[in-house]
Image (cartoon, coloured by chain):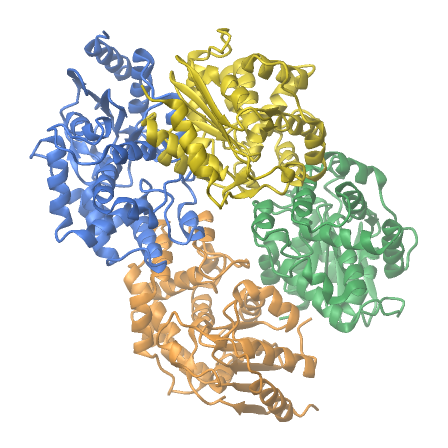
Chain colours: A orange, B blue, C green, D yellow
Amino acid sequence: MADYQQILNTIYNELLQREDKGEVASYIPELAKVEKTKLGIYLNRVHGDNFGVGDAYTKFSIQSISKVFTLAMAFANQGNKLWNRVDVEPSGNPFNYLALLEQEEGIPRNPLINSGAIVVADCLLSTYDDPKAELLKFVRQLANDNSIDYNPQVAASEMETGFTNFAIANLLKSFGNLENPVEDVLDFYFHQCSLEMTCEQLSNAFFPFANKGVCLQQTPCLTATQAKRINAILLTCGFYDEAGEFAFEVGLPGKSGVGGGIVALLPDNFIITTWSPGLNEKGNSYLGMMALEKFTTATKASIF
Amino acid sequence: MADYQQILNTIYNELLQREDKGEVASYIPELAKVEKTKLGIYLNRVHGDNFGVGDAYTKFSIQSISKVFTLAMAFANQGNKLWNRVDVEPSGNPFNYLALLEQEEGIPRNPLINSGAIVVADCLLSTYDDPKAELLKFVRQLANDNSIDYNPQVAASEMETGFTNFAIANLLKSFGNLENPVEDVLDFYFHQCSLEMTCEQLSNAFFPFANKGVCLQQTPCLTATQAKRINAILLTCGFYDEAGEFAFEVGLPGKSGVGGGIVALLPDNFIITTWSPGLNEKGNSYLGMMALEKFTTATKASIF
Amino acid sequence: MADYQQILNTIYNELLQREDKGEVASYIPELAKVEKTKLGIYLNRVHGDNFGVGDAYTKFSIQSISKVFTLAMAFANQGNKLWNRVDVEPSGNPFNYLALLEQEEGIPRNPLINSGAIVVADCLLSTYDDPKAELLKFVRQLANDNSIDYNPQVAASEMETGFTNFAIANLLKSFGNLENPVEDVLDFYFHQCSLEMTCEQLSNAFFPFANKGVCLQQTPCLTATQAKRINAILLTCGFYDEAGEFAFEVGLPGKSGVGGGIVALLPDNFIITTWSPGLNEKGNSYLGMMALEKFTTATKASIF
Amino acid sequence: MADYQQILNTIYNELLQREDKGEVASYIPELAKVEKTKLGIYLNRVHGDNFGVGDAYTKFSIQSISKVFTLAMAFANQGNKLWNRVDVEPSGNPFNYLALLEQEEGIPRNPLINSGAIVVADCLLSTYDDPKAELLKFVRQLANDNSIDYNPQVAASEMETGFTNFAIANLLKSFGNLENPVEDVLDFYFHQCSLEMTCEQLSNAFFPFANKGVCLQQTPCLTATQAKRINAILLTCGFYDEAGEFAFEVGLPGKSGVGGGIVALLPDNFIITTWSPGLNEKGNSYLGMMALEKFTTATKASIF
């Protein structure tokens, strides 16, 4: 059996020595403050021990990774009816592409680009009286950790400067694909993005996607088919316009966030989360992408 | 000399008999109430008598025609500096409207499409303490008529349902091409669109564009060069994606509005305004376009 | 263990009874002649017996499925240098196909859309003296069957009417991404598309992609990494703008052709080929897609 | 009355002293050889004397200016039926934009972009037995000068390297908007572009557009309405994506060519042709644009 701790340590030490660490996202002022030298990796093995290294136990802003949690909630709640309002095709374009949304008349390409996640958020607003509380409850259950919370300053910061998301939400509204007021939907959306979690918590929370829908605490939260289908969406759409590259180089379903986190998983096998806040030019964590390539090369892990 | 009254009467009578009168714009609830049978034409001759027929003295919502007034104010005030924030090229595209703005990184194609007019509105907000009062004063002076006013219900109606314009303004803001808050700019913009004028008032108010910048009351409001340049923009950009068609069929600079008004002019010669609320599929007044084609055919008027 | 023969028989019988069988592609005159009632399925299990049903032993025009063979040849031959000329991202767009290529300045999105496959064909022309003979040799070896051949009539038919492909090749040439003359590249490309194979032959020929690069006859033709990476491309790009849908519904890497064939595979497990010439609106085999959904549902096969 | 000779001399002398003269087009090898210091201007006054300066009597490759002649032939021949195959709207995009053509399903935006001119060329091929001879005859008659001819080397050079035009023609063919074989249409098209004329000859040949359709020799070649309509197309579409800018700055209908020529006209007044082979970044003659701005400023000439 592979010595996972040693593999993680080696990767960690190699990457920390690199001078180039990417660029920390500057468009969300609160995120711009995080130090580039942070690097954490946490491996949760479905049928075995867990391992962590570096800053694996430090909280960071999960940002777009939250889209997987809201998607799971909405899919579990609405079933396939959800796909009337959002498609499951890769977008192949930068994540804030309004052109595509306009051309396709308000039906977002998939639930992991901003427009799609805003539609999913709108579904949750229509479903729950207090969607923020429900989402928090859901994520805390998944991770089995009640310390997880929103960062209201990050949410407020995005509410003030997130003009592109306001443009997207208004465009969705103009096409009739937003049921609730723009302000309310975005308030929820910016809150979900502001969730702060550690690599360990994220790996734990993604357990059901690697375990046929059954979460860490052995309670089912999705059907096995739903879990598979979310993995398919992660693989084809999880990395903006670098989704193909990630499938090609890493070969695992996964999701990145602009806060520098990446979660990837091998069904029935493991979930691995990396965090390093410097981003590559496509908006994915620079060292995180490298860490995952090195890990899958070392372990020969791949769905293919 | 042509018998203008007879020409107008003939056109009026011919067009009123047509069964097909286009479709009244339904997306602005207040406008949807206007009767399709309305038809007015008013001719203001720069060096001669004036003539009107039908509903030429009934007020209607001038909508996008207002963009010419705000453009004139901003151009007179800022000079060519204005062109740093908005271009003067025809857009040619209606349906992927935000796409174009996104692709060109927040610089609208021209000041007569919505995005461009919103930038112009933003300029006026940065210039004047009370831009709504200033615009009203300007238009009243041009038309020499203090009865002209906003329709606050129409403005409010658009403020509630104008999601596409909110999308545009937020996209402009995301590209740094909007100085004032989105809500403030759009409040002004929707007010300017709600201006109500008659065919006679519009013909009078467009006098300076046909008279080297000098208005009806003989006070200069633009330089001769500025007036010429606005005419050039009207010709190339005044009719959305039907601009080429209008230049081809009618051969005059002009501007249409979704309220069913069209103003066209032959420099140093005349201004003609038509109003009929039914629109063709491109969003221009159906009978108004026909009236102008018939008028220019009858009088051989053309800039070409 | 599952009774695969019975599963295939059940699927076959259910689908044959459907009235709606999709529409046979009409734009290639030679293909339009094939009867819609044809339906074949062939399962090749990597570590077990093989099974066939219906028209699994009838040859058909493999069309775009051939892109996988030329990709394998070029990747084996050139290694990662190939990716300088073609990307590995999903395209997501069918209808503005040249637009994408123009926008991305002659670098096709991936090797499975026409533009990418034409670049791959160009690579083979630059590599081999007689690329048609080399491709035939390669495919015959993979399938262990020397009866496989081109259909020169189909190739000639496409050469005469394939104006879109001529447009693509010329656009590639204008961007400097085609080394050989347009006519020569397309002559080869249309020949590769004209290859005729049975479901059985295709399943056999795809063996190395499911077997770490080692073919049916136990000779290695790709490295294990190359085989994995081609599977990743198949999953993200194998079904035009229905790639996400196929990953979502079927959950396997695969490739379809306009002749009605589909090959899909579960690494280290099986290859399954279906053939039915009626297509759905996205251009993929209508009954074939259903057959694969039913098969993966029945067997719970999925990479996710 | 203005002293036109002095105005032209002043402009000529001012512009020759500029260091920056733009860049000579390099994509047509034959054109790349022309010296940047060439500058000619020729003014043909409809009701008065004519004036020339500098290289006004040197032949150059008229390139896209030829599109106006073929448009005039096709419009005279087919009347408004022509507009079923090509639109009259500005394109607002670079001249080789295939995206637009694809999106609008093979109907070019206007007859002055390459795709539109190729459709017009196709019309002439369907109309005449020997379209090359007919075009030559037509242009020689317009200019009253039998020395005008094609440059077969330039035509051959473009036939070998004009891959973008081959892409366009094949795309038109794929949409069913090309009646004749691609090779034949482009052979004619590249010949029309290779016509060589002087500033004087071009000014003479454009006489009917400024003279209600009646040519220099007083024979009618277009109706007055057709002449007006071609002027409208020139104004809205004559300068690729700088059409609005030209209307704004110069205020005259006109057409530029990549060989460095520009023809502009004021109806019932004059035709002016400039030639200087250095181009600006939009592909229009750098000094030519300046010369026309200076001329219209000095003479206050404008259609507006």
Q: Quadrant of residue B139?
A: top left
Q: Is residue D193 above or below residue B96?
A: above
Q: Is residue D294 above or below residue D127?
A: below
Given residues A61 and C49, the one toward you in this image is: A61
Q: How many marks?
A: 0
Q: Image point 80% across, 65% down: which residue? A: C76
* Left or right, residue B112 beside residue C273: left
Q: x, y (%) of residue D178?
A: 63, 27
* Left or right, residue C38 beside residue B245: right
Whether residue D91 is visible to the viewer of this picture, yes or no, is no
Q: Image point 72% across, 32% down: which residue? A: D156
Quadrant into which the N terminus of chain A falls: bottom right
Q: x, y (%) of residue D172?
A: 61, 33
- Name the residue furthest right: C146
Q: x, y (%) of residue A160?
A: 29, 67
* Left or right, residue D182 beside residue D199: right
Q: x, y (%) of residue C44?
A: 80, 64
